[in-house]
Amino acid sequence: MKLFEKYRPVFEKAQQTCATRECWSPYPDMPDKYPDAAHAKAAGLLAFEKHLQQGRFDLDQPGIHGWIGEEISPYTQAPLGVVYPQSDIDRLFDAAEHAMGSWAQTPFTERIGVLMEVLEVIYRDHLFEVLHAVMHTAGQSYNMAYAGSGVNALDRSMEALVYAEQAMRSVTPRAVWKRRFGSSDIQLQKTYRLVPRGPAVCFSCASFPTWNAWPSMMASLATGNPLIVKPHPATVLPMAITVKAFRQVLQSQGFDPNLVTLAMDTTSDPIGKLLIKHPKTAIVDFTGSVRFGQWVEQNAHPALAFTETAGCNTVVLESSDDLDAALRNLATTMCLFSAQMCTSPQNIYVPKAGVQTPQGLVPFAEVAQRLANSVQALTSDPKKAAMILATIQSPQTLALLKAMQTQGQQHGKVLLSPQPYAHPEFPGARTSTPLMLQVSTRERDLYAEERFGPISFVISCEDAQDALKQATQDARSQGGLTAFLYSTREDFIAQAEAAYARAGAQLTINLVGAMPLNFAAAYSDYHVTGLNPAGNATLTNLAFVAGRFGIVQSRRPVTLESGATA
């Protein structure tokens, strides 16, 4: 309870914000606003470089039988040279079960207090260390690694704790129940126990390792479950730092550090299916590819699975009061982290007659070209491109760009051809400007699935109704996390809101200005609806935490010995 009291003011503010859905965060949104930023930045870089120099990431956990690691920096395209302990899977599950006992019996407010301390330790001691680890594994820019993989991920983690507390608090620990049966009055003393499901396995993804993983870890641990973290082989270091921080805080508070362990594998010898099908796995959190996410959903049973994968995020461009502003905002969002985000727009649907504006109808071909010009303006200057595009996380994305360009030339028009840009700080960085293709709905085979990376399609439709129909069909059949609409017609906006709601995709309408279209605010925006193939879980709501524990009751007649009064 001591730690919970320490963090009660900030936790209560988080609770209040989850209820009001307003804008709030206890963390500064930019690196320069961090307390004593210069010292923190230098210390974080030094800690990151120390990992590279040492080469071996020591983690004292059970069953270690080898050391592996294969990370390559997208910025230098050189191996990080860090190896991590590879543990026997059965030993990790045995240790997790053993550690769960005292943790599960600890009052949930005390568990939440310990986990709030973990958030504070990551923020205070490891944030900039994680930042550099994310940069040199996932390939994000400095600012995105700080915000999206740092403080925003911390916010989502606290949000998960809020909902975990709400779910557990809703169950009264005891009650006296009275009812008359015939001539008899029956009184029962009932006791309700919150029982965790058991060991959880958390998969982190390659492009955003912490953003989904941290809140998933918090949700499982807060509800009393032990945790095995399975990082993507390309982005281990951010999660290894995370696991070590969890273990150190847990141990300092008198708990078994094996509540949190790391399960390592390689791309050539994966262990994901073994972890999911392990008889002791009770919970699976998966973020990653659509293909494996579908396998998880179909095969995790009897474990409870929470998934977020990807989909075809769509734009319907019907009419606009300020078309240039709309196109600028759309272009910026399409370029962020080279569209290696699950919320990046891919399919832009436009009526073939064009887009209505106060100046008149702008023809389809002109709309497509003006959007391409907006993208090119953002990416032609290497310094600006480095901040917005950052790097390409995987060489497979470069291969996909090449293949899609060839197909686009055969079946449509290439609006923008991808090419490397020279990163001003890292000359060897793996980079690419976006590929933009102009097609019609006849080329649906090209765009009717996620094309991961800086690839987009401007698609000619019969009219606005057809554009909306095509876009919502993408979300229903392929999945969609986000959707975007530009229209000046209130009747069409209302129609689109209803259509996207049925398709289970979050909709942003007529947004222009400095905010990226796909920015998801913790405590306010629900991330993923769970209503289409893009995933079955939402960050963050009660459903994300409530299933991670069960309620077991005992009951007995009320007597003086039971401590209840008649």
Image (cartoon, rainbow, N blue to C red):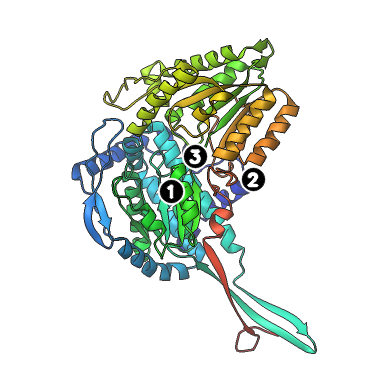
- Numbered tag placed on residue 394 in the rendering: none
Q: Residue at x 41, y 37 (%)?
A: 146
| Amino acid at dot 2 | Thr
> Crowding at label 1, few (<14), some or many (≥20) Cα neighbours within 10 Å?
many
Q: Secondary structure at mark 2?
A: helix
Q: Residue at x 55, y 49 (%)?
A: 536
Q: Nearer the viewer, residue 183 or 439?
A: 439
Disc 3 target residue: 310
Q: Secondary structure at mark 3?
A: loop
Q: Using the numbered discs, state the Cα–Cα distance from disc 3 to disc 1 in whole angstroms.
A: 16 Å
User: Which numbered disc flags the more N-terminal residue, 1 or 2?
Assistant: 2
Q: Position of residue 549 (x, y in %)?
A: 53, 64
- Numbered tag placed on residue 20 in the rendering: 2
Q: Nearer the viewer, residue 131 or 545?
A: 545
Q: Position of residue 216 (x, y in %)?
A: 47, 52
Q: Residue at x 46, y 68 (%)?
A: 104
> Crowding at label 3, few (<14), some or many (≥20) Cα neighbours within 10 Å?
many
Q: Secondary structure at mark 1?
A: helix
